[in-house]
């Protein structure tokens, strides 16, 4: 008996049982079917192949195990890309045909309790192991079934660790610590993959151990080194399309949980209104992350989210001016991720703007004096 034949027999047996197979169940069936006909090495190899194909991510599983991998992308049966922190590169992994890609996508979606078929041709959901799955089926995807797998790495680095890696250049380390100790509200901004979550987790680790941190996230990415962290996680709809728990729901519940610091892992929707309102009602030191290419674009980004949630433009800017003090902006460079700018939020008439208070490139900083004033207030 060959390993491939053994996998075929296990697949046939699994087809007779309802529900999704577990890794342990697949492994048990492989050993049962082997029946001593294969050596230990062959059995272990067959177990790995069967688990990957029948309960894991199939041919993508080895890519997901690569050290430092952040994304695995499938643009069709012959186009598989991976990012291990140094940009996307094409791999040698191939699928037999688009039907094989589609079967994998449907199985992964089913494992998360979601539907993926011609009537629901896309899905965005967290898998049981924490990986984020996005899939689109033809004909919505014109190039064949597309898969995007985002590997969520727990952020356990401290601010000192990041400084050792060059992510906290110059005086930014001392300024960031002062920002946290002064209990100023702030947003960590940057593009995709710039290290926002890692930085926010490190900054939360600098909070007073007596603080109660209530963290609202889509997935459990933030793991600050802090003794008192309460985590609230969103929940996608079930196969009937009900039961959704969104970030806005979590923020509202968090306000009733006596938080010393309210943390939103990623501000990207209507929850911005509840966060700004919370930061204006005595919840000092609140923070979160926000996608933005430059600090100066943060007010426009907040405005777009707030207006979409029902606030008018002036209300969004008024709330932001009263709630937020500093923007910590990160940039991904060829040499790594780093703090690029600390911006100060201030009023400019009826609107708010963000002006540089510190820059990694030593460029002009019109708000330098104001930043130091904010961080020095309350010091003896």
Image: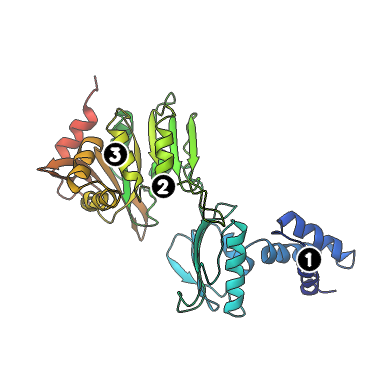
Report, in whole angstroms, how far the alpha carbon at label 1 lies from the one at label 3. 53 Å
Q: Residues within 10 Å of mark 1 (few under 14, many from 20)?
A: few
Nearest to N terminus: mark 1 or mark 2 = 1
**Of 193 and 230, the residue lying toward us:** 230
Q: Residues within 10 Å of mark 3 (few under 14, many from 20)?
A: many
Work out whether 281 lies above or below 24.
above
Report helix, strand or loop for mark 1: loop
Residue of label 2 = 197
Residue of label 3 = 276
Nearest to N terminus: mark 3 or mark 2 = 2
Q: Residue 76 location, x and y as percent?
A: 52, 76
Q: Is residue 364 left or right of residue 330?
A: left
Q: Residue 94 location, x and y as percent?
A: 58, 76
Q: Which numbered disc, 1 or 2, marks the residue closer to the eye?
A: 1
Of all residues shown, which one is farthest toward the left? 349
Report helix, strand or loop for mark 3: helix
Work out whether 72 lies above or below 365.
below
Q: Quadrant of the C terminus?
A: top left
Q: Residue 86 location, x and y as percent?
A: 43, 62
Q: Which numbered disc, 1 or 3, marks the residue closer to the eye?
A: 1
The tag on residue 256 is none
Report helix, strand or loop for mark 2: helix
Report, in whole angstroms, how far the alpha carbon at label 3 lies from the one at label 2. 20 Å
Q: Residue 193 location, x and y as percent?
A: 40, 56
User: What is the quadrant of residue 56 in the picture?
Assistant: bottom right
Residue of label 1 = 16
Q: Quadrant of the N terminus?
A: bottom right
């Amino acid at each position: 008996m060959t390993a491939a034949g053994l996998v075929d027999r296990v697949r046939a047996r699994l087809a007779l049982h309802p529900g999704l197979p577990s890794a342990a169940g697949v492994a048990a069936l492989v050993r049962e079917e082997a029946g001593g006909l294969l050596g230990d090495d062959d059995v272990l190899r067959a177990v790995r192949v069967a688990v990957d194909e029948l309960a894991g991510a199939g041919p993508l599983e080895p890519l997901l195990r690569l050290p430092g991998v952040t994304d695995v992308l499938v643009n069709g049966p012959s186009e598989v890309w991976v990012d291990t922190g140094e940009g996307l590169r094409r791999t040698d992994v191939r699928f037999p045909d688009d039907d094989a890609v589609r079967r994998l996508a449907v199985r992964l979606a089913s494992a998360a309790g979601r539907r993926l078929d011609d009537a629901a041709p896309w899905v965005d959901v967290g898998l049981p192991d924490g990986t984020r799955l996005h899939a689109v089926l033809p004909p919505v995807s014109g190039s064949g079934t597309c898969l995007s797998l985002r590997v969520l790495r727990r952020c356990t680095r401290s601010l000192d660790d990041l400084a050792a890696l060059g992510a906290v250049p110059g005086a930014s380390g001392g300024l960031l610590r002062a920002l946290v100790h002064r209990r100023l509200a702030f947003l960590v901004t940057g593009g995709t993959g710039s290290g926002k979550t890692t930085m926010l987790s490190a900054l939360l680790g600098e909070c007073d151990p007596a603080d109660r941190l209530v963290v609202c996230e889509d997935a459990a990415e933030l793991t600050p080194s802090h003794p008192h962290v309460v985590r609230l996680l969103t929940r996608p709809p079930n196969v009937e399309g009900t039961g959704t728990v969104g970030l806005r729901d979590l923020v509202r519940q968090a306000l009733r949980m006596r938080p010393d610091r309210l943390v939103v892992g990623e501000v990207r929707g209507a929850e911005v209104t509840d966060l700004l309102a919370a930061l204006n009602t005595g919840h000092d030191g609140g923070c979160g992350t926000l996608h933005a290419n430059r600090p100066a674009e943060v007010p426009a980004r907040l405005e777009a989210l707030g207006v979409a949630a029902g606030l008018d433009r002036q209300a969004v800017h008024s709330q932001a001016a009263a709630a937020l003090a500093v923007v910590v902006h990160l940039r991904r460079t060829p040499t790594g991720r780093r703090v690029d700018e600390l911006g100060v939020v201030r009023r400019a008439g009826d609107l708010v703007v963000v002006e540089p208070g510190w820059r990694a490139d030593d460029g002009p900083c019109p708000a330098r004096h104001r930043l130091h004033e904010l961080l020095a207030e309350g010091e003896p």
